[in-house]
Amino acid sequence: MEEKRVRKIEIVLNDFGQYLGANQENFVLYENGESIKEVPFHKLDQVILTPGNTISTDALFWCSLYDVNVMMTSNTGRNLSMMNPIAHNKNVETRMKQYEAYENEKGVEIAKAILKAKIENQGALLEKLGSDSHKLNVIDELENVEGKNIEEVRNKLVYGIEGKCSRTYNTQLMTQFPEFLQVKKRNKYKAEEPLNNTFNLAYEVLKAEVYRGVMKAHLDPFLGYLHSIQYSKPSLVCDLQEPFRPMIDEFLIKYSQDLDKDDFEKRGERMFLNQEKGYELIQSVNELLDKRVEHQRITNFGESSKIRTMIREEAIKLSQYLKGEKEEYKLVSKNKNLLS
């Protein structure tokens, strides 16, 4: 008989003054001194804390005992730290296989699979927007890329195929935004333009979700394949968020239609959403990630899931592929349900 799986629950403390404690059987969430939620120890999967909230040492004790990870994030959704039980890193085999793949053809196949899913999702969005998606038809070129390890082919993948597609995609994407926000170039690092910093904030929420998935899958977040290894850069997290960027892009197109110049403020030489709008954007992206869509789960829970669950399962699928439990690594692509 197949073992029945227990649906896991996540507790997020993001309202100022919330407190997570524990009694003899349950985690207990309090707000303004009143109990608002109880979750049995064995049903909790993760706790996410933001500034202004507290957690008791009793709750931390039971989190450690029941393998519940505790994530601390900034008010912008950026991951700051994670507390896991000592036994969390017991899956040594997974990381060994991850490191081995970096030195062989498997790493090449992983990078190609990630890039293929990203390009297909970009094309699906452009097609939906009525833009020209044919210029992104590079799948045959991508599949013909071969090499003994990822270092041999990364430049061709990133600066060749991905670079060409990104330039075409971004040029067409920018035309969908209000004229006062449009920019000629997507800048990530120290961007000055309001739209680029709005993109960066929304992507930060996505990145946090991918990071959680990578950690739950017992993978090393700092060793990726498509993105190179750099000090303090979670390359694998950057890899796995790529196929989901077009989903965020479409969301931002719709979100931006109600923005005006007064929604932004200058900090130094850079323009950002003001604090109120910034919090609103973070909340809206999280609501998007909570949207339930049709999607074949890798577990026995059926054919629908929240988008954030889908994102986390991509890391589990990668772990399975690395360990030889799956013959092919195929990410979510052209899923119409991801585009609202």
Image (tube, rainbow, N blue to C red):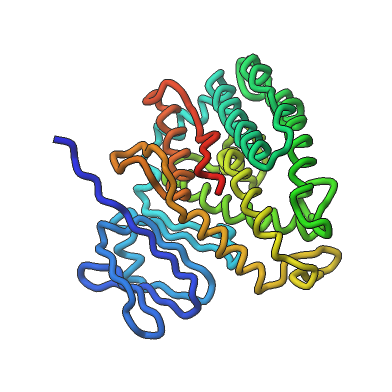
Q: Observer-nearest residue: 175 or 168?
A: 175
Q: Is residue 223 above or below residue 309?
A: above
Classify residue 143 as left or right of residue 258: left
Classify residue 186 as left or right of residue 19: right
Residue at screen point 82% across, 46% down: 185
Q: Is residue 192 visible?
A: no
Q: Is residue 59 visible?
A: yes
Q: Observer-nearest residue: 165 or 102?
A: 165
Task: Give the quadrant of residue 30.
Answer: bottom left
Residue at screen point 56% across, 25% down: 107
Residue at screen point 44% across, 47% down: 293
- Residue 138, percent across and down? 69, 23
Residue lying at the far bottom of the rendered structure = 33
- Residue 268, percent across and down? 84, 68
Q: Is residue 267 above or below residue 305?
A: below
Residue at screen point 42% across, 46% down: 216
